[in-house]
């Protein structure tokens, strides 16, 4: 999509957001919360299938994803089709009442494709071809790959349209392939022509006067390839946009084939959270169900907060309920040292996803593989079989999820939005910046954490979104900012909103050219300040700062020299007395700017002030105890204890525990890893979808 369309895209996403959920809603009306996993029967002799299906029924599995990596099995030789086995699998599942999320198997072409058509294999930045023998080996721009993939999808859709098991389509798997070959170069040029028009405009946008990079003919223009030194940042940025769009074009092509056969079957593809290579704001409106794969790092003590942020991103992409397509029952096998999940952890993590809007809780994978690279990945049915602790946890969890069916289809109300943008992320992580320590996703997380700690729900939004429905908008790190998006942030504040902007935001335009003048040029007016120097700080140095109404804090890594131009300093750098945090009443609203990188405690204080300005409170009357997550979704208040100790959480009034049926009042006590969903009396009568 031409990048100029990004503004419409926000609107399209919202439009679609309302049209998206019905597919998922139909499914959850029939099945309750979706529960299951990736099922790869092609790896097993048929005798095992009967046991699989029996165990699925026992576990309350109601949805499995079939066929993700089955291209070579369905099309053993070019043009040949073997659907017999898949017919039997789908019939078995239909007989057992297990719905199927049927995958187009195009994520992993068979060896014959790369062998006969090596041009379908991807090429890296150095010009080396990547070979088959693993997975994902395709060039997104290859016409041969496209043709073969679509022919297969056509036959798959034709064969299973109307099959009673078919409930959802799963296109490919975890899109994120990149290729630098000559075919890609051709496609990149076509994309660039559409974005920039003529070569003069391209030279201008990319600033090719620098280092004698001026192009004299389109044929000279290439994807970024290995070069002696830093490659043009605007070229790299456009290439990332192009890569996301090229994959999206392929996704759409498959989706359109599927929709032609089965207009009522929802289509998804599994996202990967804050995945760098694809702009999910542009993808989400193109699918019917937003789904995500989430594999928290057990070594990260804050992974539950990262999980919350990621789930909030998915809910925001979907504009409502989404589904967790893949998570691990216990350990993964792809980190160097794979820690298991302690007992109770999978339950806690699943409930967390439900609390944050998930209507489906699925796992990778149903039965552990005997062969291949993922033999040591945990599964719902481990190598040791069903008589195992892990499988018993799966059984118990499936049974419990049935008690939560009432939250399916409901919303998580949020009055705070965090702004996040993929192209800005890309541009802000190029080489050649004042520092590579200001990672936009890490900054987003740092600003998110205090809201999580207070039980305040947060949506995510692209800078082009209509933010007028939010009381508070925070843009922690928005390096790239077009004039039009800056103008809409300004009018958001003038109209009564509270906006907070983090450092090194509003610095460059959409082609990564620095905005002229004092920074952040397009936000100067709304922020009531301007800056002139970025002053990164040695990593081991704490920067002393002081709130102007009393109290000290420290900041790290980054400071800026700015001056107030209407804003008042709320905090100053202790050494120089220059402003560090500024607040500017503007129109009917207020804008805040943070000219440094405060440590967590100071960000927590700041969040409290922002919430006070915006008049926003959390899910509970006060902040929950440390480590406890509090989220309201539809009729339920979820309380989740991620801490190591028992926590006592005061609750606002009497409520029914949806899992046990017990009535609680005053407070609930949560053991470590315990989770409850409480329904207060006013919600008993109706299950509102709001
Ligand atoms: C995902 C992928 C699955 C499986 C899983 C293992 O990225 O979609 O096919 O590989 O990781 O954790
Ligand atoms: Zn290629």
Image (cartoon, rainbow, N blue to C red):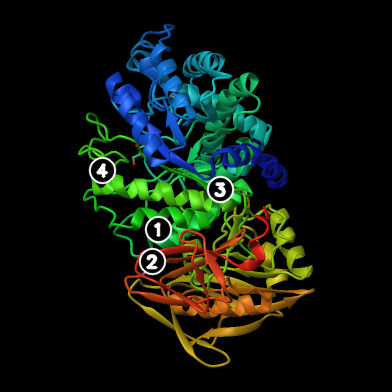
Q: Is mark 4 within 8 Å of ligand 1?
A: yes
Q: Nearer the viewer, residue 79 or 88?
A: 88
Measuring from the top left, give residue 308's x and y in whole percent.
48, 59
Q: Secondary structure at mark 3?
A: helix
Q: Picture quarter containing residue 432?
A: bottom left
Q: Secondary structure at mark 2?
A: loop
Which residue corresponds to mark 3? Answer: 423
What kind of element bears circle 4?
loop
Give the CA separation, mark 3 to mark 2. 33 Å
Q: Is residue 121 above or below residue 403?
A: above
- The structure residue drawn at horizontal position 45% and vertical position 56%, both measured from the top left corner, is 351
Instruction: Determine which of the numbered discs, if any, sits on residue 348 in the image.
Output: 1
Disc number lying in front (4 or 1): 1
| Label 1 to label 3: alpha-carbon separation | 34 Å
Asked if residue 690 is positioned above or below residue 203 in the image, the reply reads: below
Left or right side of 106 for 541: left
């Amino acid at each position: 999509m031409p990048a100029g369309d990004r503004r419409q895209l926000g609107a399209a996403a919202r439009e679609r957001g309302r049209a998206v959920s019905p597919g998922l809603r139909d499914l959850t009306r029939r099945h309750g919360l979706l529960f299951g996993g990736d099922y790869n029967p092609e790896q097993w002799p048929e005798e095992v299938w009967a046991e699989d299906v029996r165990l699925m029924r026992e576990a309350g599995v109601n949805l499995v994803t079939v066929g993700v990596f089955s291209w070579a099995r369905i099309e053993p030789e070019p043009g040949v089709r073997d659907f017999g086995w898949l017919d039997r699998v789908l019939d078995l599942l239909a007989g057992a009442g297990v719905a199927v999320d049927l995958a187009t198997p195009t994520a992993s072409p068979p060896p014959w494709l790369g062998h006969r058509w090596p041009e379908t294999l991807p090429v890296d930045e150095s010009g080396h071809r990547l070979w088959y023998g693993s997975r994902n080996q395709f060039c997104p721009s290859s016409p041969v790959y496209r043709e073969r993939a679509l022919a297969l999808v056509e036959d798959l859709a034709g064969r299973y349209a109307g099959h009673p098991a078919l409930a959802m389509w799963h296109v490919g798997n975890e899109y994120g392939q990149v290729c630098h070959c000559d075919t890609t170069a051709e496609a990149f040029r076509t994309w660039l022509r559409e974005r920039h028009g003529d070569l003069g405009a391209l030279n201008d946008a990319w600033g090719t006067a620098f280092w004698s990079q001026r192009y004299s003919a389109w044929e000279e223009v290439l994807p970024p390839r290995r070069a002696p030194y830093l490659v043009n940042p605007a070229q790299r940025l456009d290439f990332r946009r192009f890569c996301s769009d090229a994959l999206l074009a392929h996704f759409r092509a498959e989706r359109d084939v599927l929709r032609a056969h089965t207009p009522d079957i929802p289509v998804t593809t599994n996202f990967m959270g804050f995945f760098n290579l694809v702009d999910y704001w542009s993808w989400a409106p193109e699918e019917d169900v937003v789904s995500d794969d989430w594999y928290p790092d057990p070594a990260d003590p804050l992974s539950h907060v990262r999980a919350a942020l990621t789930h909030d991103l998915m809910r925001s992409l979907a504009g409502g309920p989404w589904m967790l397509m893949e998570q691990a029952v216990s350990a993964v096998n792809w980190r160097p040292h794979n820690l298991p999940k302690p007992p109770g952890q999978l339950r806690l993590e699943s409930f967390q996803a439900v609390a944050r809007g998930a209507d489906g809780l699925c796992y990778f994978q149903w039965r552990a593989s005997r062969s291949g690279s993922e033999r040591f990945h945990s599964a719902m049915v481990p190598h040791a079989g069903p008589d195992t602790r892990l499988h018993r946890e799966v059984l118990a969890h499936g049974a419990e999820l049935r008690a939560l069916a009432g939250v399916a289809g409901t919303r998580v109300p949020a009055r705070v939005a965090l702004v996040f943008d993929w192209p800005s992320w890309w541009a802000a992580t190029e080489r050649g910046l004042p520092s590579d320590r200001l990672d936009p996703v890490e900054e987003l997380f740092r600003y998110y954490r205090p809201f999580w700690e207070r039980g305040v729900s947060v949506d995510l939004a692209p800078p082009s979104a209509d933010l007028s429905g939010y009381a508070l908008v925070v843009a922690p790190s928005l390096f790239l900012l077009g004039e039009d998006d800056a103008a809409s942030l300004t009018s958001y504040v003038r109209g009564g909103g509270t906006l907070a902007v983090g450092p090194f935001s509003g610095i460059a335009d959409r082609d990564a050219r620095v905005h002229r003048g004092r920074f952040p040029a397009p936000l100067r007016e709304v922020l009531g300040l301007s800056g002139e120097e970025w002053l990164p700080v040695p990593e081991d140095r704490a920067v002393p700062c002081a709130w102007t109404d009393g109290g000290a804090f420290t900041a790290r890594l980054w400071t800026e020299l700015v001056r107030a131009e209407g804003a008042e300093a709320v905090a100053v750098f202790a050494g120089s007395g220059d402003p560090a945090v500024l607040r500017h009443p503007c129109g009917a609203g207020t804008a805040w700017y943070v000219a440094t990188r405060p440590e967590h405690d100071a960000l927590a204080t700041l969040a409290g002030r922002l919430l006070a300005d915006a008049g926003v409170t959390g899910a509970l009357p006060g902040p929950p105890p440390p480590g406890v997550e509090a989220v309201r979704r539809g009729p339920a208040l979820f309380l989740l204890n991620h801490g190591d100790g028992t926590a006592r959480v005061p609750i606002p009034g009497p409520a029914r525990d949806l899992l046990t049926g017990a009535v609680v009042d005053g407070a609930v006590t949560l053991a470590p890893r315990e989770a409850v969903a409480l329904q207060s009396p006013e919600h008993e009568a109706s299950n509102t979808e709001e």
